[in-house]
Image (cartoon, rainbow, N blue to C red):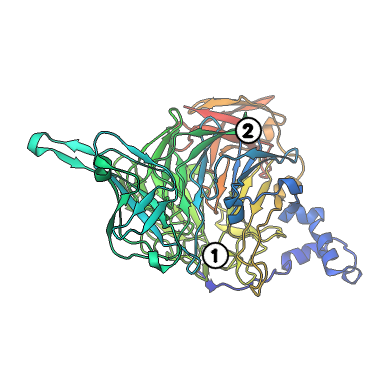
Amino acid sequence: MKIRKAGRTKRLALGSTVALTVAGMNAPAVLGFAGAQYHQYVINRPEYKAQYGHWQTLALPAEFRVNAVHATLLRTGKVLIVAGSGNDEKQFNAGTFKSLLWDPAKNTYKLIPTPADMFCGGHTSLPDGRVLVAGGTQRYEKLDGAVKKAAGVMRVRNESPERARTFPKGTVFVAPDGREYTSTVEVTVPAATKTGAGKQTVVTAGEQHVFVEAVGEGPDYVTNSPAQYRIKGLTGADAHNLYGQSEKLTLDKQDYQGIRSAFEFNPDTELYEQVTDMSHARWYPTLTGLGDGRVVTVSGLDDTGQILDGNDNEVYDPKSRTWAKAPDHYFPTYPSIFLTATGKLFYSGSNAGYGPADKGREPGLWDLSNNSFRPVPGLRDPGLTETSSSVLLPPAQAQKVMVLGGGGVGESPLSTARTDIVDLSAPGPAYTPGPDLPAGGTRYLNSVILPDDTVFTTGGSSGYRGRGGSDLLKAQVYHPDSNTFSTAAEPTVGRDYHSEALLLPDGRVAVLGSNPLFADKAETQPGGFEQRIEIYTPPYLYHGDRPEVTAAPQSAKLGGTLRVGAARPDAVTTAKLIRPSSVTHVTDVEQRSVALDVTGRTADGVSLTLPGNPDLLPPGWYMLFLTDAAGTPSVARWVQVTG
């Protein structure tokens, strides 16, 4: 296990294995090539590609360049790339929110009207192939020294049981001494509730919070004392029943604030459709699909910049497009939460950045049926799980989850090379050590399940947001069968914060985004947003002919048989359904590879049997891959799994 401070990690030489390979290529003399030219010669040799794979960089046309913060593969084969305001406050203030639809097969692009700032929301694919996007940004953070107006949380109370009341953005709350503060968004306060009767009647005030800021700048508006505030313009009974309460209003740092809005993206119309708002605003939430098709939604910063305390979890029902309360449990933001074969949810410990260091960091199994949480011990470097990667190892039937790398809480310079693996099917699941990451301490590592039952990992940085020029231009492949890493071709674009990677239907991997804090090692220039897309072609696509699916039904039932046409049925050794990725902030809890039994062969195809457990194979659209003995996959066919 290696823990190290941030620092620049130099790009390594090709290494002895590659050097031996090159030596056997009858390559021209090194002296006849500049270093860069020779390197290009080496990495473009067929022998090199067949062992290490190959990278291609796409520079999008200027009008289609967006800051890729979120990426979801659709059942159409296109990739929905969501930027929202793209971590650009100028775009936020201008109301400029972007989404891009990219077709990797045709390399075409289309900008999608984006109705809200989905930047740093959560998302997942629904059983019908739509994408649920929930939460996003209501307000950007303001750091210490940048806050000009005293601000804070106002709890608005309603003591009238007759009706709820809605107050628009800009509602004025007046302190006992006459100082005024205005609400930054609209707020609806529920009616009071009444219980009992007669002298035993008890009225409990309805309450909702809203963020307010002073009408003027400076310290004269700061108050650190609890007070009750009247709502300007109310008279009579309303003035008595409706009021605000605040503990303090200060010039302290203000965190990002979330929104309640939720949308479904329709892959047929290629438009967002608004659905019922969540009960709680969320910024940095995780959405995890359940075996019954619903989606559990946890964590995030609310509309006052406070992390949700765990009694705010919600469940979305795609049939009614409504939300309901979910069991209570506290998690830091963007927790990696996986659906297990028992229906329980496993929190791996990976998360992405907000929440105290001593709360909600322990991995464990969360049972929604009785709201119990069973800790899973053994994870090494437990204080270095922020910005770590987690993946449900293939095949999903093995029920093993791997945690890779990570760093300290907040802007910590620490990172770790640790990988640990837990077998959730064991009677007493506990993490056991895996191999260290070859590049050493790594944050923001992206991990992608491949059709040959390996996991491709790429990018990241040893320091916080690439500080000190610490991006790692390295990639590797994890082999679950041998518990080892092998070297992959090196990417040419650094990837750290706000980067994503996902498997494409043709077996390649797309890598997007990156948002370093600085543009230079000396940290004198602010970083920009990486808008190029890289595509990695794994070695298995350089091994000759690949299996071919000639026909496949578009749907299959749990526990049923899927008859698939194949050009060379005898060459098919394995089949799997791989769920499309929906990834942000190195958090991709949806990708899983479910092995199918090959139960029959004919002259023109194979018969495949699906598992019958919806918690192992949740309803939805999957990529069906056939693979041969060398692990070479077919181009995927899309199949919808139903109950």
Point 36% across, 64% down: residue: 358
Q: Is residue 281 left or right of residue 418?
A: left
The number of callouts visible is 2
Q: Nearer the viewer, residue 32 or 74?
A: 74
Helix, strand or loop for disc 2: loop
Q: How crowded is the residue under tag 1: few (<14 C-alpha within 10 Å), some, or many (20+)?
A: some
The amino acid on which the numbered mark 2 sits, given as a three-letter code, is Glu
Q: Quadrant of residue 621?
A: top right
Mark 2–mark 1 contact, CB under 8 Å?
Answer: no
Report x, y in % for residue 199. Answer: 8, 38
Point 54% across, 42% down: residue: 116
Report x, y in % for residue 19. Answer: 77, 66
The amino acid on which the numbered mark 1 sits, given as a three-letter code, is Asp
Q: Nearer the viewer, residue 218 or 571?
A: 218
Residue that lies at the very extreme toward the left in this rendered image? 199
Q: Quadrant of residue 482?
A: bottom right
Q: Which badge, 2 or 1, is on the more N-terminal residue?
A: 2
Report x, y in % for residue 181. Answer: 39, 55
The numbered dot on residue 436 is: 1
Helix, strand or loop for disc 1: loop
Please indicate, yes or no, whether residue 107 appears anywhere in the rendered image: yes
Q: CA distance from mark 2 to mark 1?
A: 42 Å
Q: Nearer the viewer, residue 562 or 336?
A: 336
Please indicate, yes or no, whether residue 309 appears anywhere in the rendered image: no
Q: Nearer the viewer, residue 386 or 310?
A: 310
Report x, y in % for residue 462. Answer: 58, 67
Where is mark 2, residue-wise?
A: 270
Q: Is residue 159 left or right of residue 340?
A: left
